């Protein structure tokens, strides 16, 4: 007999995953390797270790080990905010009048406000294990920087965050959260690095960009004894750590005899979506399920739906390795959007490969429709979602309404990656009717794609 | 054999309390009744019903029923964010090197960011049951207004919030959260009420005050067909609803065979502390425990530690009923403080009576010492606490350090009422060394107390 399903399924701490699942190990066609931008040869372990922590490089390159143990120290930290609840959206189902069952995995119940902490604590742990003094990183919207600050504070590591200047100025509260956790936050471009000084000389009034902040963070890490650079998305290692999201979700569903028919997540660099779908996709790849997967991206930055599958630079500054991925071109500058976490020109290689094989779908949505869904959801389910997360809400509602038409009792699962407390300026624009949608023209996309590196 | 205690004790939804505990029913010496400010006679049910919802008036006046059932509709809403976790502060204990066991009940995992939602949803429910169209209220720091907006949105009630003008302008994000939940938010004083217009005429440039906002909200409620006024603290009904905090805490401790030796909470109007201690104090009043209770208040607004136990007005405007309570005088204007939720001249009558009988202790702490404790706690336990909640953290740490000296293995429980995401401006002042402490002089307090109403 099936148990009655509660509003929130909380696993016990004993049920917290003991190992991450490495989705690449289940893929017949592996994601293509990272290439050295100069030699175009696959990046070696030694090359990568100059920038990244050794253990993380190992994880980055490992596409055969199915499960990788989560060290006890990381699990202990996870216990402070995990297992995260899997919430049955009873109120939303009722309001929509849908026969579908809707579940969402809520990753917002920690101070970083998002899932980013899952990888931040892992990366900080391995840095500490390696005997490093500290790490550097960049942050745009600020969630990753906050998560990393918390993780470094826990392990007593120094944390240097390069924050895109316009964010630094527009989001002073994000900056203060990082300072509370002892991080030093530098507006980028800055005079603390050669690349920063060069950019400031060329463009004196610039507001900075993620590409520039990455360059500064990498330079700072490689120039300092005992420092490495860490990144919050796109990389394989990040997807590996984020698989804790999917593993908990699947355990919770299994516990109540539920089977996901559709899994939905927002996709910027792909860290959340890659983590959420990992165990479900692994089953599908083994022929044990016919679950459907939907990546949701902003219409203003339609990487999967309108991009090209090709080798490209991961950063705007073109100093990082080349990655084979769906991309709009590293020169594509997404329109200013209220979901800063999804403004990335590329997509992590694992998801790109799965999408290319037709194992995953993608959909793009406009931001005003996203904020409509966000406000609707907040009023019904209580939680105030981040704009990024609300992309998944929008499509989950769409799918539930389709079920209403067809009468199908599908089980829909989506990832609610975080809260919108630091995004109220965007909500204000929405309330005041001042939010606009921007969809790039074909010509704009073609122009950026024309600059892809040649082979 | 004792079970191993997890980091977070989550009760199941079935363990959610089915009834609130009415602490007054256990008290030999009842809190004194509210008095009509004109006749000085106890307020009758009819008089109170002109301003408040009928069922809430019943609860307000009931000091004999020990347990009052929580309606199913309220429990269903509670299930969206409750039971709240009782967290064992393993990391903090280790860092302090104390033999004490420290637990905290965390009420910040909901969008209002605090415990206020526990009473907001109850008050909105009874308003809906009575067939009302809407409710009015005032808000200072904004947590109560946010909670009430969420509750009204859930039940489809109109919600009019009068927000102290300086908060309205300084905390635009709080305002936007309320708008997201469909509330109308008016900066007070406003031209929408007679009292507001009068004040604006007298003091054209005024930034408003809580007293003024209360007056406007009461006028708005009584002037509109189908509206009533609701309040987020001080009242008996609020303490009743907030007892869900204490009940869950006690159930969680009982489950693991733990017994609280000290229970600590911050105290402004007393809603959180009154709710947290309710079942523990009820046991003490029945001679079943010798638990110690500590109310923590700001040194800038030392109601219990330096005030007087007397009948006084609940509001600065002196239009509300008289309440016997510890008070600094309704004319006492607390210094601008970063814990806006604790800037209240009085204390709920139940806690005042218990304190007067020596059943509860009180301590006042300076705000810089509170922010030091807050930052220390955030770095160790992850959660970024609200300034209000951090008053309890400060004293919990003090008590744990005493145990370190004496070697006593006491069990310390404190209430972590909320998160500080909307208080980063205060954290910034603290980080920049710009935060000051203000302790009122004896002369200032005597002056305000000299104006207590005479009998």
Image (cartoon, coloured by chain):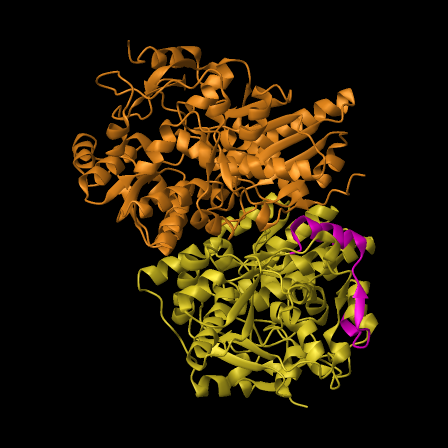
Chain colours: A orange, B yellow
Q: Of A82 and B84, which appears nearest the observer?
A: A82
The quarter in which the N terminus of chain A is drawn is top right
Q: Is residue A384 left or right of residue B384?
A: right
Examine the rendered structure and indicate whether residue A223 appears above or below residue B225. above
Asked if residue A384 shows in the view, the reply is yes
Residue at 70 percent across and 50 percent down: it is B79
Span colored in magenta: B60-83
Query: Which image quarter is the C terminus of chain A in?
Result: top left
Quadrant of the rendered image containing residue A332: top left
Q: As drawn, which residue projects farthest toward the front?
A: B1
Residue ranking furthest to the bottom: B455
Residue B205: give x, y in percent of width and height.
46, 61
| Residue located 61% across and 19% down the image | A287
Q: Identify which residue is drawn at 52% across, 38% down.
A: A244
Q: Nearer the viewer, residue A85 or A281?
A: A281
In percent of width and height, residue B395 lies at 48, 74
Vertical arrangement, residue A109 with respect to residue B404, above or below = above
Q: Residue at x 20, y 32 (%)?
A: A199
Place of residue B329 in the rendered image (x, y in percent of width and height, measured from the top left):
56, 81
């Amino acid at each position: 007999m099936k148990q009655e399903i509660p509003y929130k399924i909380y696993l016990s701490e004993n049920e917290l995953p003991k190992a991450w699942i490495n989705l690449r190990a289940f893929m017949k066609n592996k994601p293509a390797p990272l290439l050295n931008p100069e030699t175009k040869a696959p990046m070696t372990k030694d090359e990568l270790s100059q920038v990244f922590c050794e253990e993380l490089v190992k994880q980055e390159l490992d596409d055969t080990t199915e499960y990788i143990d989560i060290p006890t120290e990381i699990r202990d930290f996870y216990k402070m905010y995990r297992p995260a609840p899997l919430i049955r959206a009873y109120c939303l189902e009722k309001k929509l009048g849908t026969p579908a069952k809707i579940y969402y995995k809520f990753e917002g119940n920690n101070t970083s406000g998002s899932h980013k902490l899952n990888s931040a604590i892992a990366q900080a742990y391995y840095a500490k294990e390696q005997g490093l003094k500290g790490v550097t990183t960049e942050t745009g919207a600020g969630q990753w920087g906050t998560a990393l600050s918390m993780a470094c504070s826990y392990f007593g590591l120094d944390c240097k965050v390069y924050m895109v200047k316009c964010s630094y100025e527009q989001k002073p509260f994000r900056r203060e959260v990082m300072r509370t956790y002892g991080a030093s936050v530098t507006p980028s471009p800055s005079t603390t690095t050669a690349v920063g000084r060069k950019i400031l000389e060329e463009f004196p009034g610039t507001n900075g960009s993620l590409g520039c902040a990455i360059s500064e963070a990498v330079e700072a890490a490689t120039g300092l004894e005992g420092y490495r650079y860490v990144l919050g998305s796109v990389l394989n290692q990040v997807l590996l750590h984020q698989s804790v999201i999917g593993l908990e979700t699947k355990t919770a569903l299994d516990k109540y005899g539920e089977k996901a028919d559709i899994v939905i997540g927002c996709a910027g660099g792909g860290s959340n979506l890659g983590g959420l779908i990992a165990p479900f996709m692994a089953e599908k790849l083994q022929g044990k399920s016919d679950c459907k997967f939907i990546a949701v991206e902003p219409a203003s930055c339609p990487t999967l739906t309108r991009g090209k599958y090709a080798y490209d630079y991961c950063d705007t500054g073109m100093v990082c390795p080349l990655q084979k991925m769906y991309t709009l071109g590293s020169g594509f500058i997404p329109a200013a959007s209220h979901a800063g976490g999804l403004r990335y020109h590329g997509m992590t290689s694992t998801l790109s490969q799965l999408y290319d094989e037709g194992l995953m779908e993608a959909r793009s949505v406009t931001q005003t429709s996203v904020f409509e869904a966000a406000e609707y959801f907040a009023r019904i389910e209580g939680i105030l979602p981040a704009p990024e997360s609300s992309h998944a809400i929008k499509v989950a509602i769409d799918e539930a309404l389709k079920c209403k038409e067809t009468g199908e009792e599908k089980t829909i699962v989506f990832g609610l990656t975080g809260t919108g407390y630091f995004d109220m300026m965007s909500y204000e624009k929405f309330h005041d009717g001042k939010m606009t949608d921007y969809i790039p023209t074909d010509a704009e996309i073609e122009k950026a794609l024309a600059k892809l590196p040649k082979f």
